[in-house]
Image (cartoon, rainbow, N blue to C red):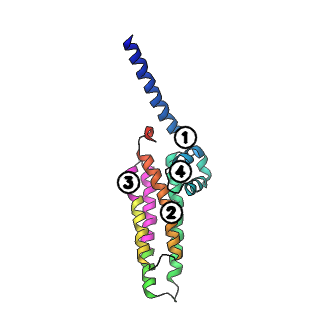
Amino acid sequence: MERITKFFLTMVICMIVMAHHISAEESKGKELINKVCTLSPTRDLCVEVLSSDPKSSKADLKDLAIISLTVAARNASGILTETKSLIDDPNLNPDVQQGLADCKETILDAESQLEDTIAALLLDSKTDAQVWLKAALAAIDTCDDSIPGDDDVLSVQSRAFRKLCNIAIAMTKVLAKPPQQF
């Protein structure tokens, strides 16, 4: 009788673990967005960004991570465009122009690193994705350090870039965990 009770208890525990594992894998779309965005320091922005793509309604965790990275890459492109237009301003101090030129190079690096992050996710290399994402954040820090002051247009855009990258970081951390731990 005791063996049957232990066997039954073991089966119940296995079924609970399997059900949790399956439910974590089956969460998609809005339910998954709400769940993953609770891990983000900017929950409302996270929900807004991830819901902005029409594919998000059927997206799994990897798809949502790619959506967030795509939005971050668009933001980086916007910073790059703004940087290029500011460099051409003849009224700028030469030190600021040099800082903008340096910033332009690091933003190009950040864009490339975001592409590498997406590629790493597509190859299921979650650890590499986190490394590339952190490199993109380091690039934007270098850009900010290149330009004096913190109230310029680029500083505002770089803060938005960091928030977008932090959303992606939260998601890649979840992706790196076994499904039953999310």
Numbered label attached to residue 107: none
Q: Earlier in the sequence, mark 2 or mark 3?
A: 2
Q: Nearer the viewer, residue 78 or 112?
A: 78
Mark 4 secondary-structure assignment: helix
Residue 170 place in picture, x, y as percent: 46, 52
| Circle 2/circle 4 CB separation < 8 Å | no
Q: Quadrant of the N terminus?
A: top left
Q: Amino acid at mark 1?
A: Ser
User: Disc 2 and disc 4: Cα gap in Å?
Assistant: 19 Å
Residue extending furthest bottom? 91
As displayed, is residue 159 above or below residue 23? below
| Circle 2/circle 3 CB separation < 8 Å | no
User: Disc 4 and disc 1: Cα gap in Å?
Assistant: 13 Å
Identify the residue at image location x=44%, y=51%.
172
Q: Rate crowding at label 4 as few (under 14), some (14 to 19) or many (20 or more) other CA atoms within 10 Å.
A: many
Which residue lies under the disc numbered 1?
Answer: 27
Which residue lies under the disc numbered 4?
Answer: 37
Left/right of residue 128 with respect to residue 60 in the rendered view: left
Q: Earlier in the sequence, mark 1 or mark 2?
A: 1
Q: Which residues are magenta?
A: 104-132
Numbered label attached to residue 128: 3
User: Disc 1 and disc 2: Cα gap in Å?
Assistant: 26 Å
Q: Rate crowding at label 1 as few (under 14), some (14 to 19) or many (20 or more) other CA atoms within 10 Å.
A: some
Q: Rate crowding at label 3 as few (under 14), some (14 to 19) or many (20 or more) other CA atoms within 10 Å.
A: some
Which residue lies under the disc numbered 2?
Answer: 73
Q: Amino acid at mark 4?
A: Cys
| Circle 4/circle 1 CB separation < 8 Å | no
User: Disc 1 and disc 3: Cα gap in Å?
Assistant: 25 Å
- State which mark lies toward you, 2 or 4: 4
